[in-house]
Image (tube, rainbow, N blue to C red):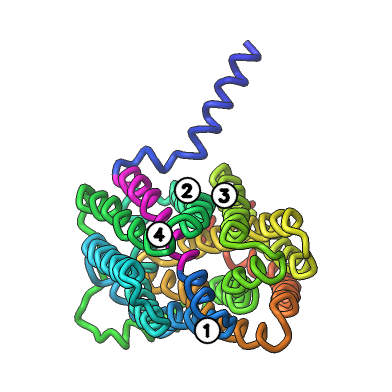
Amino acid sequence: MKNKSKKINSNQGRKSVVRALRHRNYRLFFGGQSLSMVGTWMQRIAIPWLVYRLTDSPFLLGVVGFAGQIPGFLLLPFAGVLADRWNRQRMLILTQSLLMVQAFALSLLVLTGTVQVWHLVVLSLFFGAVFAFDIPTRQSFLMDMIGEKEDLGNAVALNSSIVTGARLLGPTLAGILIGLVGEGICFLINGTSYLAVIAALLAMKIPSQDLQSQGSRVWDGLKEGFVYASGFAPIRVILVLLALVSLMGMPHMVLMPVFAKNILHGGPHALGFLMGAGGLGAMVGALYLASRSTVLGLGKIILISVIVFGLGLVAFSFSRILWLSLVLILISGFGHMVQMASSNTILQTISDDDKRGRVMSFYAMAFSGMMPFGSLFAGLFAGKIGAPATVLIGGLACLLGAAVYARRLPALRKMVHPIYSKMGIISEHY
């Protein structure tokens, strides 16, 4: 009888980890995105390697990274307003189609031997502009697909596992293919992979969405969303911490070709292993969050994850051994994923339904919108003080941000308590 009870609990645990997959629309999304994101991560590895192969310049690595990310900083707030007003399913079909065209254009330029750095800058700008509308729409579309708020945290975690699984597999495949047949095939595979997610979106049956009235101006909607997000301390503090980590911590990604080639004395395979190690750590983090059955405690988990991420970067900056660097990047990947997904879950849970698209646009702005500035600064500083010192400064900045957040955490818990009580997440006297 005791063994039978253990078996039932084990089955319930497995069901809990993947409970969002019981929704048909989310299953379609999960399958399509799982294929598409592998191609996306292959492209994310191939572009910086191509830039560094063509130019041997850390500065131009930063410039191309900046070009791919700056449109997000400028356009994400407006994209959030449109995500609250327009049909999100149709918006995603459009954005995914445009991203497919961009990948095929990259492939054509590389395979015909005509690619130049300015091509990569222009196409990165195009990618960033389209992706700015894709991110908040895709994030707020999660609720449309599952329809039940209690499964939202699991859906966010599983969505993160898609990205991290692709981050684990994509860079490894890219490293192998770049060495064998060059970057152009990576871009071709990415373009083809978008067909899977477009087909999944077309097959979905989404109930009519409760969209915001389009009578008011977009600027008014943006102002309303900004006042709402900045006026509620839990949302504001989480976004500020995420922005700091993205600005100071995440630019280590754009310097990975420098570490792989000059610091660790490897090639495209070493770059693929480094990116894959970060993906493995992130996958572990996503699975850990998916196994959780409640949003309670995520505030403290955000604090711990930022500390883990910062310490991982500090240690990585001193490593000159490949296997040790892989372990440290794995730890950093775990910390970053847990912070990002935990922040996402809390923000979507505590946000008003009619403002979720705008809150998620601010989330995307804090996460990816700050990266262009970080990439540009990382390229500049790496050229002057070296890549290891640049990563060290970023890790220390993350630890400082964690210390400030720790002081605010008790007060933030008190502010969120009434929301969780109203939703039935905790009892009134908890």
Q: Position of residue 177 (x, y in %)?
A: 46, 55
Q: Position of residue 371 (x, y in %)?
A: 53, 77
Q: Identify the residue position indicated by label 1 in the image.
A: 60
Q: Residue at x 44, y 82 (%)?
A: 67
At label 3, the amino acid type is Met
Q: Which residues are magenta?
A: 25-46
**Disc nearest the viewer among 2 and 1:** 1
> Residue 166: within the magenta?
no
Sooner in the amino-acid sequence: mark 2 or mark 1: 1
Q: Is residue 119 above or below residue 147?
A: below
At label 4, the amino acid type is Cys
Q: Position of residue 123 (x, y in %)?
A: 35, 77
Rendered image: mark on residue 285 = none
Sooner in the amino-acid sequence: mark 3 or mark 1: 1
Query: Contact (CB < 8 A) between labels 2 and 1?
Result: no
Q: Tell whether 378 sits left or right of 356.
A: right
Q: Residue at x 55, y 74 (%)?
A: 239
Q: Identify the residue position indicated by label 3 in the image.
A: 283
Sooner in the amino-acid sequence: mark 4 or mark 3: 4
At label 2, the amino acid type is Leu
> Residue 33: within the magenta?
yes
Mark 2 is surrounded, within 10 Å at the Cα level, by few (under 14), some (14 to 19) or many (20 or more) other residues, namely many
Badge 3 marks a residue whose secondary structure is helix
